Image: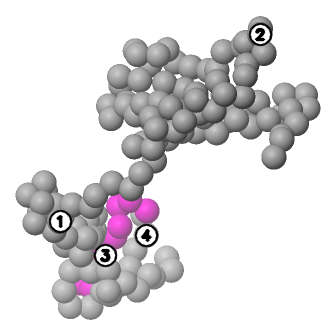
């Protein structure tokens, strides 16, 4: 399949995709490496790292195939699925229980105004909850 590059449209799309890989995933496509620490990226290859100009001499099909094979070998580890942590290892690294964290967030971000009346300081909305402090399972907004 041959893709025509009328007016540099393919180059523009390619540049956007490579910039996306660089900014979002910290992958330098042309250098075929991933930077785990985002701060290291600009120091190693400049703020923007782009492809060079086309070679002045015609490149043989064999040279292209060889370069492509080596390039794919370098890129394969970057795009392969990584192992998932076991629950035990995740717990050792500080994994938190989502339900408990949501409850902590709700309790930290609600203020009791009166009996059964509460305020969310983040949004400024008031709501009613009868009985105990609010939880995400008991939320009844009040129009003020």
Give coordinates of residue 52: x percent, y percent: 66, 15
Identify the mark nearer the N-term, 1 or 2.
2
Identify the mark nearer the N-term, 4 or 3.
3
In the image shown, does 73 or 105 lie closer to the viewer? 73
Residue named by callout 3: 118
Cα distance between the residues tagged 1 and 3: 40 Å
Whether the magenta-drawn stretch holds residue 70 is answered as no
In this rendering, the label closer to the viewer, 3 or 2 = 2
Measuring 72% from the left and 22% from the top, which residue is drawn there? Answer: 60
Label 3: element kind? strand
Residue named by callout 4: 125
Cα distance between the residues tagged 3 and 2: 74 Å
Q: Are marks 1 and 3 in contact (CB under 8 Å)?
A: no
Which numbered disc covers residue 86?
1
Cα distance between the residues tagged 4 and 2: 69 Å
Residue 43 is left or right of residue 61, and the answer is: left
Dot 2, how many residues are within 10 Å of its Cα: few (below 14), some (14-19), or many (20+)?
few
Dot 4, how many residues are within 10 Å of its Cα: few (below 14), some (14-19), or many (20+)?
some
Dot 3, how many residues are within 10 Å of its Cα: few (below 14), some (14-19), or many (20+)?
many
Label 4: element kind? loop
């Amino acid at each position: 399949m041959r893709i025509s590059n009328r007016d540099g449209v393919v180059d523009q799309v390619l540049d956007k995709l490579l910039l996306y890989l660089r900014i979002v995933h910290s992958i330098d496509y042309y250098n075929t490496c991933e930077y785990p620490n985002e701060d290291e990226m600009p120091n190693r290859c400049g703020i923007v790292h782009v492809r060079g100009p086309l070679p002045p001499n015609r490149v043989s099909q064999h040279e292209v195939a060889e370069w492509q094979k080596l390039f794919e070998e370098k890129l394969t580890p970057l795009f392969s699925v990584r192992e998932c942590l076991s629950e035990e290892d995740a717990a050792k690294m500080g994994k938190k229980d989502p339900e408990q964290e949501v409850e902590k967030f709700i309790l930290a971000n609600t203020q009791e105004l009166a009996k059964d009346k509460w305020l969310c300081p983040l949004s400024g909305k008031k709501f009613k909850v009868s009985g105990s402090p609010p939880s995400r399972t008991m939320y009844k907004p009040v129009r003020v």
